[in-house]
Image (cartoon, rainbow, N blue to C red):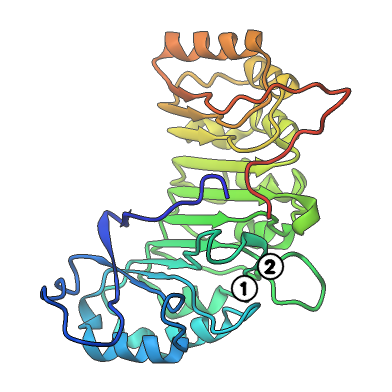
Amino acid sequence: MTDITDHETFHGLPVHTLSPPGPAESAAPPAAGSVAWRLDCYPYELPFEEVWRRFLDEVDTTRVRALLIGPWWEEDYISLDPVVGAIVADAHRFPALRALFLADVESEQCELSWLELCDITPVLEALPLLEELSVRGCGDGVPGEENLRLRPVRHQALKTLRFESGGLPGHVVRAVGASELPALEHLEFWFGSQWYGGDTTVADLAPVLSGASFPRLRHLGLQNSEIQDEIAAAVASAPVVARLESLSLAMGTLSDSGAQALLDGQPLTHLSTLDLHHHFLSDPFVSRIEELCGRAGIRVDLDEADRWDPEDEARYVAVSE
């Protein structure tokens, strides 16, 4: 599962996994507000409700600033809905919570497309002071199964919103674009593959690309897409780009046609960072982009170059299953 790794830090805090039940730890537990707490049912095969109750009982949740939900299921294909329900029901016990990661799960524990999510809107409604929300997975797009859902919301505090998906449904992208998020500074989408339900189109991105939706946006990641060239062409003339400090079109199927659109489009020289890693560019286009970024002092990532024969091979995204 490319680009999906353990978190050593989250929201600027070291990640600490709640210890399993058993003999007392030799070291004292960290102060509640000094770490990002991670809950993980996987190694111990404990019900999420039991781990959640221990967390509420043993940790001063009024001081918890960041929370990651790791594997939460006892059996395969269990929906995230009980987790969302628990967070919403006990939201009043987390007045200091500013960052939440839903489904912080590695491929060794569960493939991305197997993670059955749910409607995450109640989390944003229950946590009006939340500043950072990351979501991993979405389901596999099969009708009748539990997949990621979002309704348009108004949230005054949210600064970072990140979706890591191997198949992000277009209705989620449209709901983000229809939301009122006046504080949003960092927005990141991993679109994934149609095979796993990723049906987002460039038209779905119109409210984001217009620049009207999120006046404080400084980083935009439109990543891991099978239509990366089309997205690059839209970005080349998108009004939102002028206010960005960093831009990522990484992890997808970017080829020379998409790179040409970027080079022919509006200036990118105001950016501090341009991330294009995992691409299908030819050497001449890599050189042209490196030259442009070098002159402008832009940090550019062109790692993970794939050599592509359009007659024999299909391009692929970095993260799908």
For label 2, the SS is: loop
Q: Is residue 213 left or right of residue 51?
A: right
Mark 2 vs 1: CB contact within 8 A = yes
Q: Position of residue 167 (x, y in %)?
A: 70, 56
Residue at horizontal 75 percent and vertical 58 percent from the top: 196
Amino acid beneath label 1? Leu
Residue at horizontal 47 percent and vertical 18 percent from the top: 269
Q: Is residue 21 left or right of residue 4?
A: left
Instruction: Check residue 139 in the rendering and tell me which mark sits there, or answer none.
Output: 2
In the rendered image, which quarter is residue 234 located in? Answer: top right
Q: Which residue is mark 1?
A: 117
Asked if residue 28 is positioned above or below residue 272 in the image, the reply reads below
**Residue 71 visible in the snapshot:** yes
Q: Residues within 10 Å of mark 2 (few under 14, many from 20)?
A: many
Residue at horizontal 50 percent and vertical 60 percent from the top: 106
Q: Is residue 61 left or right of residue 216?
A: left
Residue at horizontal 77 percent and vertical 65 percent from the top: 141
Q: Position of residue 9 (x, y in %)?
A: 30, 55
